[in-house]
């Protein structure tokens, strides 16, 4: 469905030839026209993103929305994935911080990461897969002053314009310096610790050359009380463009080096019933700003796949490092023939480290679980280090403790190479015109990870949580400075793993467009060849290892899980699959059109099928496990009036999924078919200084079949309703905007806890002080509402004492910015 925020068309190409350059200075931030009615009503604007030919938005049958730079600045979003919550049809559970978001669209199943979607920068995917364990694609993308716009495609032609993203693509497109100007800004958290500097500038150098460069740097604790500087880093991006008659060539670069805190579920009070649960903070732990991170849990020792002791700093959190170089070109090669190509190579590494509450229970009960009756507790560190806990039931006013699994994954190599080359032949007759596009997409993605998790015992305290030691009935210490075990025996040591993998994708494709009178017909076919190679291994047992090197084998050191390289298994297979998309658009009048599209797409699974029998002993794989297929149908109407625009789209989708969930002990592996259908509405209205955008998505999605847990068949899997409302008012130098985003309740699993519905309200205000200076304030979740996005232990229902775990959106945060135009 075309967007009412700003309408466009399919992905994944970025831009056509740059717009004509001028020498005027870029207007100051608040002086720029807010992208609103004028833009959303410009349905004659030519579609240039990923289409086989140039047609207006009103004549396109592709579903795309656009968020321009000013809209992005006004959303109050705190991460790249959080921005997507403003787009109708997109469900983005972005409460994990800078990464690890669960993202889907239009009733497609929600999974870890963006399983059926991809993030792209300037027309090419950032990674080849959106759901790599501990390296979800949103972890390696940032929004700053270099951003020009975000184009969001849902379903449809995404099936044939990029590999492994049948559900949609989120394309972050950079400014290119066509207009001279830039800005510098400082942002400071009012009620939390963050300081950020943004800078960007670009301009034409002459009639042929232009450039744009910028980036950001930030530091602070972040919106949750982790107890140390957890946000630390930034990025630099830039490009250089050379124009010539009939085309251009552009070079890109990006340097990302950033740390951000990992927000996982936290202890929470859940009362009521499974169908109508009530969520609240526990005494001593604020669900909205508390964290399991603590200044008393700063380092971790573990053993890697090569038998070496590794020291990890928890401040690494999402450790994202990427260096990328890219080039794109577009030009005429002969009469009616045009070439368009993009290529990028990136070296990407990092780490994911964050505390996960595997069990929340009474402190005395967990102590008994660890070493039997008669167990007692004492503080392992903090201000009361060494002191016995005489009455565990009174601990922090909640009497609880947490068995913490420290998710710790080294991302040794996520480097990739991608190119997309295509050639278009245009035809034109007296009453009709058309084009044929032939293309070739290639990607190589490395996935080299080493997991080494450990288990700790913590008090339930939202800030500065201390570690706890356990003493057995004979008075012997069975833990080591709060460390319960190397590995996670509570989960069967499932997650001491190592793999070195390479995934190659080759995909030729062809697209056809034909326009006759008021009717446009589009069709495209893609053929993917996906090859996987490499090795993987899990823990092969435990060994006694003096991990801390003090010469004494402490109790946890007597059983250290290790990876034996001689037990590694091969990965060696090739799968092939076709995709197609066909659509039509008919113009009933200058402001009214009907459209329809049918598509079949797929994505090849990556490392998430390694453990659990997905890969055979010889490295081969069954095709129905290797490839997840998606069939989608959509159709609707677009209407443009003098002051308003409205779009309505009916959609239907069937998805086959093979996946794993490492945090679920009851149902770790998934093999299901999902069905969904619904209605997506999107509208815009503007008059004078007032404008409003609105979106409403109704979805009926369910599990149609389940090979592993058949009792789940019929289960609802998506919220029935999602809505967005964003009114704004401009008067003179003042701009005010509200952003309301809401979802209805939906069950997490059958006969288990329901995810409650919630509405989040963000606010934005800016004041233009003069032609150059702008002061603004942004409030996120201004009413400080709990918004639950994940209940990992939902299958147990409401517990006897109400203690459980969940992940909520962050509480209220306020930022103030001062920006100067350059």
Image (cartoon, grey):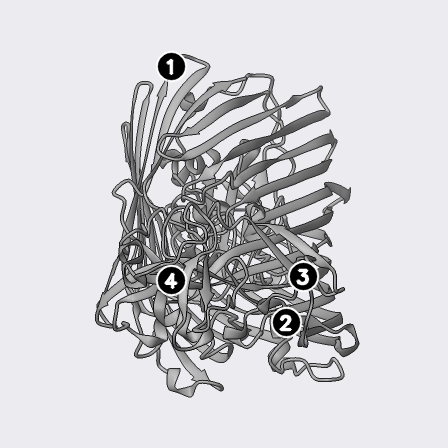
Q: Quadrant of the C terminus?
A: top right
Residue 512 visible in the snapshot = no
| Image position of 803 with respect to 766: above or below | below
Q: Position of residue 295 (x, y in %)?
A: 48, 45
Q: Position of residue 802 (x, y in %)?
A: 26, 67
Position of 188 with respect to 732 (left or right) is: right
Q: Quadrant of residue 334?
A: top right
Crowding near the residue tagged with mark 1, few <14, some 14–19, many ≥20 C-alpha atoms within 10 Å: few
Crowding near the residue tagged with mark 4, few <14, some 14–19, many ≥20 C-alpha atoms within 10 Å: many
Q: Quadrant of the N terminus?
A: bottom left
Q: Which label sits in the foreground, 1 or 3?
A: 3
SS category of the residue bearing label 2? helix
* Residue located 59% across and 59% down the image: 408
| Image position of 99 with respect to 567: above or below | above
Position of 577 with respect to 746 (left or right) is: right
Q: Quadrant of residue 142?
A: top right
Q: Which label sits in the foreground, 1 or 2?
A: 2
Label located before the other in sequence (1 or 4) = 4
Label located before the other in sequence (2 or 3) = 3
Check residue 769 in the rendering and tell me which mark sits there, or answer none: 1
The residue wearing badge 2 is: 558
Q: Position of residue 554 (x, y in %)?
A: 61, 65
The residue wearing badge 4 is: 401
Alpha carbon separation for disc pair 1 and 3: 59 Å
Alpha carbon separation for disc pair 2 and 4: 24 Å
Alpha carbon separation for disc pair 4 and 3: 25 Å
Q: Nearer the viewer, residue 730 or 637?
A: 730
Label located before the other in sequence (4 or 3) = 4
Residue at the extreme top: 770
The residue wearing badge 3 is: 547
């Amino acid at each position: 469905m075309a967007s009412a925020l700003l309408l466009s068309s399919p992905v994944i190409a970025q831009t056509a030839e740059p717009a004509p350059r001028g020498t005027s200075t870029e207007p100051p931030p608040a002086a720029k026209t807010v992208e609103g009615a004028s833009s959303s009503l410009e349905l004659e604007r030519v579609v240039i993103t990923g289409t086989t030919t140039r047609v207006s938005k009103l004549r396109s049958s592709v579903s795309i929305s656009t968020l321009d730079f000013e809209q992005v600045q006004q959303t109050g979003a705190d991460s790249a994935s959080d921005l997507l919550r403003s787009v109708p049809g997109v469900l983005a559970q972005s409460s994990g911080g800078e990464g690890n978001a669960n993202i889907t669209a239009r009733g497609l199943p929600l999974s870890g990461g963006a399983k059926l979607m991809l993030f792209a920068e300037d027309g090419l995917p950032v990674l080849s897969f959106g759901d790599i364990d501990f390296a979800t694609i949103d972890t390696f993308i940032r929004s700053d002053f270099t951003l020009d716009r975000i184009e969001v495609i849902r379903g449809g032609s995404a099936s044939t314009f990029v590999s492994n993203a049948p559900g949609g693509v989120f394309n972050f497109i950079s400014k290119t310096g066509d207009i001279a100007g830039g800005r510098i800004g400082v942002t400071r958290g009012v009620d939390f610790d963050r300081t950020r500097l943004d800078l960007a500038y670009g301009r034409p150098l002459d009639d042929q050359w232009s450039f744009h460069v910028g980036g950001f740097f930030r530091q602070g604790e972040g919106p949750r009380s982790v107890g140390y500087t957890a946000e630390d880093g930034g990025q630099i991006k830039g490009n250089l463009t050379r124009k010539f008659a009939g085309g251009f060539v552009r070079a890109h670069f990006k340097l990302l080096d950033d740390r951000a805190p990992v927000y996982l579920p936290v202890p929470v009070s859940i009362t009521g019933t499974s169908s109508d649960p009530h969520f609240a903070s526990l005494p001593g732990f604020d669900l909205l700003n508390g964290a399991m991170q603590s200044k008393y849990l700063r380092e971790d020792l573990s053993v890697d796949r090569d038998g070496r002791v590794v020291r990890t700093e928890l401040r690494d959190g999402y450790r994202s490092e990427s260096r990328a170089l890219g080039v794109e070109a577009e030009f005429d090669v002969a009469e009616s023939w045009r070439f368009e190509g993009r290529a990028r190579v990136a070296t990407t590494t990092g780490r994911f480290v964050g505390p996960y509450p595997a069990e929340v229970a009474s402190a005395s009960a967990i102590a008994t679980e660890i070493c039997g009756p008669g167990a007692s507790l004492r503080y392992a560190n903090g201000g009361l280090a060494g002191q016995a806990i005489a009455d565990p039931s009174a601990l922090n006013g909640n009497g609880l403790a947490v068995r913490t699994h420290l998710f710790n994954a080294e991302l040794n190599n996520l480097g990739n190479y991608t190119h997309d080359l295509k050639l278009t032949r245009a035809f034109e007759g007296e009453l009709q015109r058309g084009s044929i596009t032939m293309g070739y997409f290639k990607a190589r993605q490395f996935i080299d990870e080493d997991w080494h998790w450990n288990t700790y015992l913590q008090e339930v305290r939202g800030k500065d949580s201390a570690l706890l030691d356990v003493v057995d009935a004979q008075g012997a210490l069975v833990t080591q400075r709060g460390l319960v075990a190397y590995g996670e025996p509570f989960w069967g040591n499932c997650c001491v793993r190592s793999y070195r993998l390479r995934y190659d994708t080759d995909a030729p494709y062809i697209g056809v467009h034909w326009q006759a009178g008021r009717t446009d017909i589009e069709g495209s076919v893609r053929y993917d060849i996906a090859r996987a190679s490499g090795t993987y291994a899990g823990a092969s047992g435990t060994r006694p290892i003096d991990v801390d090197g003090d010469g004494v084998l402490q109790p946890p050191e007597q059983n250290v899980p290790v990876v034996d390289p001689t037990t590694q298994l091969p990965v060696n297979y090739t799968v092939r699959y076709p995709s197609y998309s066909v659509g039509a658009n008919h113009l009933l009048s200058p402001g009214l059109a009907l459209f329809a599209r049918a598509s079949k797409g797929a994505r090849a699974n990556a490392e998430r099928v390694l453990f659990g029998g997905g890969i055979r002993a010889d490295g081969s794989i069954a095709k129905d496990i290797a490839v997840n297929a998606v069939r989608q149908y959509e159709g609707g109407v677009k209407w443009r009036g003098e002051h308003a625009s409205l779009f309505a789209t009916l959609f239907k989708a069937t998805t086959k999924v093979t996946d794993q969930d490492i945090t679920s002990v009851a149902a770790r592996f998934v093999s299901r078919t999902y069905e969904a259908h619904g209605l997506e509405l999107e509208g815009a209205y503007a008059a004078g200084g007032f404008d409003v955008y609105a979106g409403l998505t109704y979805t009926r999605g369910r599990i149609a079949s389940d090979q592993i847990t058949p009792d789940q068949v019929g289960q609802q899997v998506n919220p029935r309703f999602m809505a967005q409302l964003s009114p704004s008012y401009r008067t003179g130098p003042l701009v005010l905007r509200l952003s309301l985003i809401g979802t209805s309740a939906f069950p997490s699993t059958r006969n288990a806890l329901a995810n409650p519905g919630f509405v989040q309200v963000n606010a934005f205000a800016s004041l233009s002080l003069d032609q150059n200076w702008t002061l603004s304030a942004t409030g996120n979740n201004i009413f400080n509402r709990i918004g639950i996005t994940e209940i990992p232990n939902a299958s147990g229902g409401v517990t006897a004492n109400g203690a459980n775990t969940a992940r909520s959106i962050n509480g209220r945060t306020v930022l103030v910015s001062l920006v100067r135009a350059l």
